């Protein structure tokens, strides 16, 4: 499928974006995927793709007469990009792009591609250093980004502003959520057995 207006997204990620919420029928998904002339896909191909995504656990199917509805399997709801963006949702808009870039840069320990920033909800200009074409090519050869299409022309960024305390707080919050570590209002862990 041509890239079209999907902004570097693979078909799987486009479908996941479409079915968020209560889910959608094959007809609704078909209409949304085919909004752009450059990204047309045949209905039978899409149906097979949806079946495969359900078999692999990305989607769940349910029947609601007269249609079969596809919705997102809960485990697929959030990528690292969306998690970081949600942790920084209360930050001022004028700094949010730089903060998200810095936190992702620290977590992933490499320059961050524009499509990754888009997955975190950042569209448009980013105040950061762009890596050159040669560096970008080396990075593309080393990095495998599941669900994102990276081309040699995809921009990648290195932060020029640092937010180490913010990054530390976000990483701690992610770990605390993963291991269900309960904290009181002052941030002190309530039960030690949660991490044992």
Image: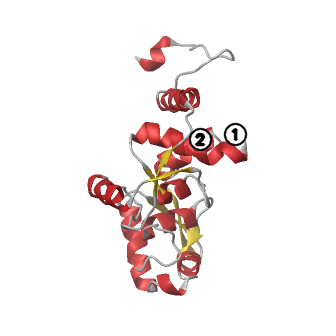
In this rendering, the answer to whether 186 lies above or below 97 is above
Residue 83 showing in the rendered view: no
- Look at mark 1 in the image and give the residue it sits on: 91
Q: Residue at x 58, y 30 (%)?
A: 166
- Quadrant where the N terminus lies? bottom left
Q: Position of residue 107 (x, y in %)?
A: 44, 38
Residue 5 showing in the rendered view: yes
Q: Residue at x 43, y 66 (%)?
A: 12
- Look at mark 2 in the image and give the residue it sits on: 99
Cα distance in 3D space between marks 1 and 2:
9 Å
Q: Nearer the viewer, residue 149 or 173?
A: 149
Q: Nearer the viewer, residue 99 or 180?
A: 99
Q: Position of residue 195 (x, y in %)?
A: 44, 19
Instruction: Point out the frontmost of discs 1 and 2.
Output: 2
Q: Nearer the viewer, residue 33 or 60?
A: 33
Q: Residue at x 61, y 60 (%)?
A: 123
Q: Position of residue 117 (x, y in %)?
A: 53, 54
Q: Residue at x 47, y 27 (%)?
A: 179
């Amino acid at each position: 499928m041509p890239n079209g207006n999907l902004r570097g997204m693979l078909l799987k990620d486009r479908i996941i974006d479409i079915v968020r919420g209560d889910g959608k029928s094959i007809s609704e998904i078909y209409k949304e995927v085919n909004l752009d002339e450059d990204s047309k896909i045949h209905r039978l191909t899409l149906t097979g793709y949806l079946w495969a995504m359900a078999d692999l656990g990305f989607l769940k199917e349910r029947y609601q007469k007269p249609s079969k509805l596809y919705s997102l399997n809960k485990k697929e709801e959030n990528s690292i990009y969306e998690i970081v963006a949600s942790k920084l949702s209360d930050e001022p808009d004028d700094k949010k792009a730089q903060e998200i870039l810095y936190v992702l840069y620290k977590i992933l320990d490499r320059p961050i591609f524009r499509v990754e920033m888009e997955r975190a909800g950042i569209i448009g200009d980013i105040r950061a250093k762009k890596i050159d074409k040669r560096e970008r090519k080396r990075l593309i050869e080393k990095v495998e980004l599941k669900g994102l299409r990276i081309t040699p022309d995809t921009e990648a960024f290195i932060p020029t502003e640092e937010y180490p305390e913010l990054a530390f707080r976000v990483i701690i919050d992610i770990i605390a959520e993963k291991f269900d570590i309960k904290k009181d209002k002052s941030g002190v862990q309530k039960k030690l057995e949660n991490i044992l």
